[in-house]
Amino acid sequence: MTTSNGNGHTHDVLVIGGGPAGSTTANLLAHAGHDVLVLEKEVFPRFHIGESLLPIDLPIFERLGVKLDYKDFIRKDGAEFIDERTGAKATFVFREGLEGTPKNAYQVERSRFDHHLLKQAEARGAKVRYGVRVQEMAVEDDAVRVDTSAGVIHARYMVDATGQDAFMARSNRTVQPLKGFGCVAVFRHYDGLAPEIFEELTASGEFVDAQGLALPEEARVVRAAPASGEPVVTDGPFPEAKEFLAGFWIIDVESAARAHQIAARVSAAPGKGGVPMNMPIELRQVMSKPPEDL
């Protein structure tokens, strides 16, 4: 029998999974003086979905010795939920939350955020091994034996922080799916805006807002019924439509020339391989009043 470090060492705690749950566990235990080893099957940074944090997370980050700032992550002051079936909306402003709780949260890029947390666990004394996949585990008399792609590891305790992979549950065949739950999550990321452009427009106060829009096949066309005036809803453009509005910006500038200058810079933003996309940018003025002829 061999161990991953070749000397028969038994760790206090073995943590499987280097996501936020695993790195938090490792951070606190290592900070308390325990011998902790984290095994992560991926090599960080790696892509992961789930970027939205809540204000109650901030005291936890402080306890972990993790500092977040606006330069690395986007400040979030609230959230809005929309029921697409009824159009009902619910808005939650964090500063109006429970007394004593933080007034803001952050929207994070998980690849960088997760790596940041795991590096902080290392800084507090945890050992981290990337690219190591756990294969099997067995409880022995005085330790947990874990077979991995890098050898056999022993620990007094093992923490399963594999999230949806559910290593322990799947190994013991105790996974119980929620049949008929009918929950589907869809996500989309937009990029292409050079950071220096965003920083410049934010600093100058010219950047007001930016929104990405759903694809054409998700669009709906609404007309009023001739007799009743009730809404008549039909499908939007065909999915194979070659041109559609993918999103929009709102900028507040002093002249049309300045708007043209910004549009030209955005058009030349780097695409695949760093080659300028030179995509057409359509400019429209936000009206303060209806045109004279309406």
Image (spheres, rainbow, N blue to C red):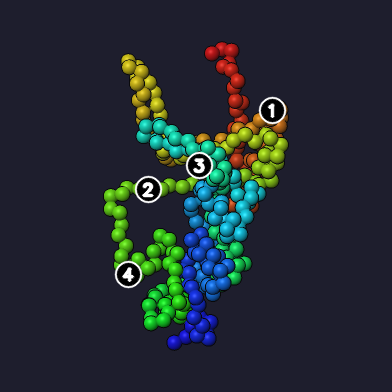
Q: Residue at x 59, y 55 (%)?
A: 62
Q: Seen in the image, is 217 located left or right of residue 78?
A: left
Amino acid of disc 2 = Val
Q: Earlier in the sequence, mark 3 or mark 4?
A: 3
Alpha carbon distance from label 2 to label 4:
26 Å
Q: Residue at x 59, y 12 (%)?
A: 292
Q: Secondary structure at mark 4?
A: loop
Amino acid of disc 4 = Asn
- Quarter occupied by the N terminus: bottom left
Foreground residue among 249 and 274? 249
Q: Quadrant of residue 77?
A: top right
Q: Secondary structure at mark 3?
A: loop
Q: Earlier in the sequence, mark 3 or mark 2?
A: 3
Residue 65 spot, x, y in % from top left: 61, 59
Amino acid of disc 1 = Ala
Alpha carbon distance from label 3 to label 2:
30 Å
- The crowd level at tag 4 (other Cα within 10 Å; few <14, some 14-19, many 20+) is few
Q: Residue at x 39, y 23 (%)?
A: 223
Residue 98 image label:
3
- The crowd level at tag 1 (other Cα within 10 Å; few <14, some 14-19, many 20+) is few
Foreground residue among 95 and 69? 95
Alpha carbon distance from label 3 to label 4:
41 Å
Residue 172 image label:
4
- Quarter occupied by the C terminus: top right
Q: Earlier in the sequence, mark 1 or mark 2?
A: 2
Residue 256 image label:
1
Alpha carbon distance from label 1 to label 2:
43 Å
Q: Quadrant of residue 45?
A: bottom right
Q: Residue at x 66, y 30 (%)?
A: 252
Residue 12 spot, x, y in % from top left: 49, 75
User: Which residue, given by chain and number where applicable, does mark 2 sit on?
Assistant: 184
